[in-house]
Amino acid sequence: MSKSKSDSADKVRIVAAMSGGVDSSVSTALLVEAGFDVIGVTMRLGSLDKMDVETDKPNCISPDVIDDARRVAMKLGIPFYAVNYEEQFRQNVIDYFVKEYLSGRTPNPCVVCNREVKFGKLLSLAANLEADYIATGHYAKIEQNRDTGRYILKKGVDSRKDQSYFLFALTQKQLSQSRMPLGGYTKNQVREIARKYKLRSAEKMESQELCFIEDGNYRRFLKDCATDNIPDGDIVDEDGIVLGKHHGLPFYTVGQRRGLGIATGTPLYVTEVNVTDNTIIVGEAASLLRDSLRVERMNLVGVETLTAPINALVKIRSKDEGAPAKITPLSETEAEVKFDQPRRAVTPGQAAVFYDGDIVIGGGWIK
């Protein structure tokens, strides 16, 4: 069955990701209102935290969440499916999450989940359903540069909810086949739309940061997941003097102050997680400042290649406002970022994302 790829809603089929929350519910409702042929889908994802009573297997998407999404789909009059991506989620997200922490890095599972599962597996499902696009409730925008034909990722208008940082790793193919209806709305406007449609998700609380750790205790989660015991080790200062003991490298991250269990006259922070000798290095606040970093596995969105240094605003964590920097390409997949002013707590394993105004130039993983 041939389908139009234009922006016209006529005969265009879209698979809408539905989590049961207000954002995905309103995103789906807007597509239905615009006249698209919409199919709602909830992805069942895997976790060690919540057991599915029917299969006795891990499942972090509870029956209540699936029921909430199904009820919204029924109200909107669209088909609905719940698909099991437990194994894919475990392999691509949970295993990565655990491995990064055990390697002394601080992971960003949402970025990986978006690329590999939400915009990876879901696009494969969309192809099987003869759909043209997938749609999500992300607060970001996708546009196409008419001069170059390249798909552009932009910040959402609600700066408090903007999720473009978590989407920097998406490929051109993924962007070309995706829609994000909420990019032009604020969270308050989205809730008002949900009330207009009388959706049960209108007053629903925000979802937790990590969907696969129900109680938010990632330390317990890592202990449950680790195949070997996580050894204790020394906490040392920058001169190598032992100040105390740590309870396992995965439980500490650069910039951390609380939970060190050491008493000195000056506040100390984790400045490095050293896997080689199983030590946590601490120092004063000034020791957290870095004027540069390197990224690997760089993905470019707004431009096809970087052949010369560019100036951009660089965010080193999702809630970061960003800071001016010069980005110098070292290869197709690596670059050096030199900040105009030193940044605090540059953390290996996190993402550094480059912006030109509202446009995502690209990003990479901090080495």
Image (cartoon, helix red, strand yellow):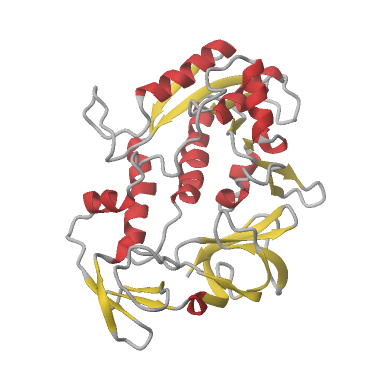
72 or 364: nearer the viewer: 72
Residue at image point 35% right, 67% down: 104
Residue at image point 56% right, 14% down: 78
Residue furthest front in the image: 265
Looking at the image, can residue 236 be seen?
A: yes
Residue at image point 31% right, 33% down: 59
Looking at the image, can residue 339 be seen?
A: no
In this rendering, would 289 be left or right of 144?
left
Please provide percent x and percent y for residue 181: 67, 32
Q: Quadrant of the N terminus?
A: top right
312 or 246: nearer the viewer: 246
Above or below for 273 versus 51: below
Residue furthest bottom in the image: 239
268 or 59: nearer the viewer: 268
In this rendering, would 281 be left or right of 56?
right
Please provide percent x and percent y for residue 251: 31, 61
Residue at image point 26% right, 50% down: 220
341 or 35: nearer the viewer: 341
The image quarter in which residue 360 lies:
bottom right
Residue furthest left in the image: 229
The image quarter in which residue 280 lies:
bottom left
Please provide percent x and percent y for residue 340: 68, 76
In this rendering, would 142 be left or right of 217?
right
Please provide percent x and percent y for residue 112: 46, 50
The mark tally for this picture is: 0
Above or below for 99 versus 325: above
